[in-house]
Amino acid sequence: MKKVCCVLMALALVSGSVFAGGQKAAEGGSKLVYIISPSQENPYFKAEIQGAEAKLRELGYTVQTVSHDDDATKQDQLYDAAIAAKAVGIISDNASATASVASIEKAKKANIPTVLIGREINATGVAIAQIVSDNFQGARAGAERFVELTGEKGNYVEFTGIESDTASATRSAGFHDVIDQYPELVSIAKQSANWSMTEAYSKMESIIQSNRNIQGVICGNDTMALGAAQALKAAGLDNVVVMGFDGSNEARDAIIAGDMAITVLQRAYANAQLGVQQLDQYLKTKSTGQPEKQLIECSVITIDNARKLETFNLSQ
């Protein structure tokens, strides 16, 4: 009986030392960090994951990478799993600007801080950092080049991302902040393609069937732009100015091949590593040393600098 009691007491001491909030990471307790992201099928999210994983392992953390597949319910279940696993922190490119808030709050109450990368949420004081691309600035910069390449006139189509995604709305607003100043640029269709290449291809195909007089296509991400470009090429429509947003290698190659004209670079890998550094800083000092919301400037990629782009990084 004495032996049993001693074992139970030892187990209690061990379990108590494994996790008692973020500060235990610096004291030699649990070092598990969850990365909760959209699907790695998208090269942007894949680069985020690779950047976060590399930096976490460099800093001595163990990593559990999971995907919410843009499903807020699944994301909430993954947050529950992170809490049950006694993770010390979460790096997330979240599933919904609104629905994600409750999940992040739940982790916060369990003393597990969340750093958001890529997408922001409609709340402050919940995540310890929101590191996002300056979508409005990037969209405006891309739109200025789009206007130039179309000669300030013609019919254009717009494909937006998931409607609940703040980045989708912000990019569209940035595009229109510039394009709407040119009355001879006429919108003939605006549809959500939900960040999907296949959906953009199908919808572009349908639009072409009803109106082949198209001079430009603006898209909220590269995946949709690539789908639209493929549909235009299949229909024999050349010289259409296609613009994406992300700065993927696939978009780079399409620009070099002449199938796309513009993408807007987000530094996915570097931004994810910055998020990890701030999580590490918070776990050690209870402060990231930075404001919660941080906007990272975007860059325009065209044929002029496309060959300098590699894995969401633009060399000088």
Image (cartoon, grey):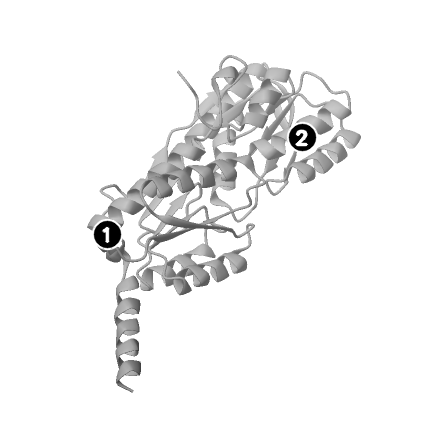
Which one is in front, 110 or 293?
Answer: 110
Q: Of the residues tagged 2 and 1, which is closer to the observer?
A: 1
Q: Which residue is mark 1?
A: 26
- As displayed, is residue 34 above or below residue 42? below
- As displayed, is residue 102 above or below residue 179? below
Q: Amino acid at mark 2?
A: Ala
Q: Residue 75 appears at what percent x and percent y?
A: 50, 56
Q: Residue furthest bottom?
A: 1
In the image, what residue occupies the spot 25% across and 41% down? Answer: 290
Q: Which residue is mark 2?
A: 228
Relative horizontal placement of residue 310, taking residue 128 as reference (left or right): right
Relative horizontal placement of residue 34, taking residue 218 as reference (left or right): left
Relative horizontal placement of residue 58, taking residue 81 as reference (left or right): left
Q: Residues within 10 Å of mark 2 (few under 14, many from 20)?
A: many
Q: Residue 201 appears at what percent x and percent y?
A: 70, 34
- As displayed, is residue 175 above or below residue 106? above
Q: Quadrant of the C terminus?
A: top left
Q: Residues within 10 Å of mark 1 (few under 14, many from 20)?
A: some
Q: Quadrant of the N terminus?
A: bottom left
In the image, what residue occupies the spot 26% across and 42% down? Answer: 291
Residue at disc 2, secondary structure: helix
| Residue 219 placement: quadrant | top right
Res. 137 visible in picture: yes
| Residue 109 placement: quadrant | bottom left
Q: Amino acid at mark 1?
A: Ala
Which one is in front, 249 or 9?
Answer: 9
Which one is in front, 69 or 143?
Answer: 69
Q: Residues under labels 2 and 1: Cα distance?
A: 49 Å
Q: Residue furthest left?
A: 285
Residue at disc 1, secondary structure: helix
